[in-house]
Amino acid sequence: MTLGARESAALVRLLADAEGLRPAGRVTDRLGRPGEAYVYDTPGARRMLILDPGTGTVLGLETTATITRDDPRYGIRAGAVLEYSAWLR
């Protein structure tokens, strides 16, 4: 499902009041597009929402590991991308 204008606007309104969500600045998403990132840290993972800076359209969501050393028990490297979703219109 691709978020439409209404869904994107509703998501931004919802996130504006989310505790723990903070701006992380300009980023380039996995598809090479410029965006503004917002992050939310949880134990072991950082979730990042990437929005188009001009329109507020959701470009992607990314989850990365926040461990500082590789963990061979789980096959996870420090800072590894655990999950990524991107949307095109």
Image: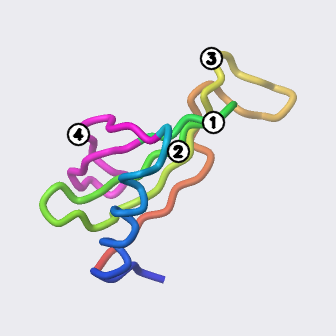
Q: CA distance from mark 1 to mark 4?
A: 21 Å
**Image quadrant where one finds the C terminus:** bottom left
Q: Position of residue 43 (x, y in %)?
A: 69, 31
Name which of mark 2 and mark 1 comes first in the sequence: 1
What type is the residue that disc 1 sits on? Thr
Residue of label 4: 26
14 in relation to 62, above or below: below
Instruction: Work out which residue is located at the far left of the displayed protein and give it.
Output: 54
What type is the residue that disc 2 sits on? Arg
Q: CA distance from mark 1 to mark 3?
A: 14 Å
Q: CA distance from mark 4 to mark 3?
A: 23 Å
Whether tag 4 and tag 2 are in contact, CB under 8 A, the answer is no
Residue in view at x 41 percent, y 80 percent: 2
Residue of label 3: 68
Which mark's residue is nearer the viewer, 4 or 3?
4
In this picture, which residue range is highlighted in magenta? 21-38
What type is the residue that disc 4 sits on? Arg
Name which of mark 1 and mark 4 comes first in the sequence: 4
Instruction: Work out which residue is located at the far front of the displayed protein and give it.
Output: 17
Which mark's residue is nearer the viewer, 2 or 3?
2
Which mark is drawn over residue 42? 1
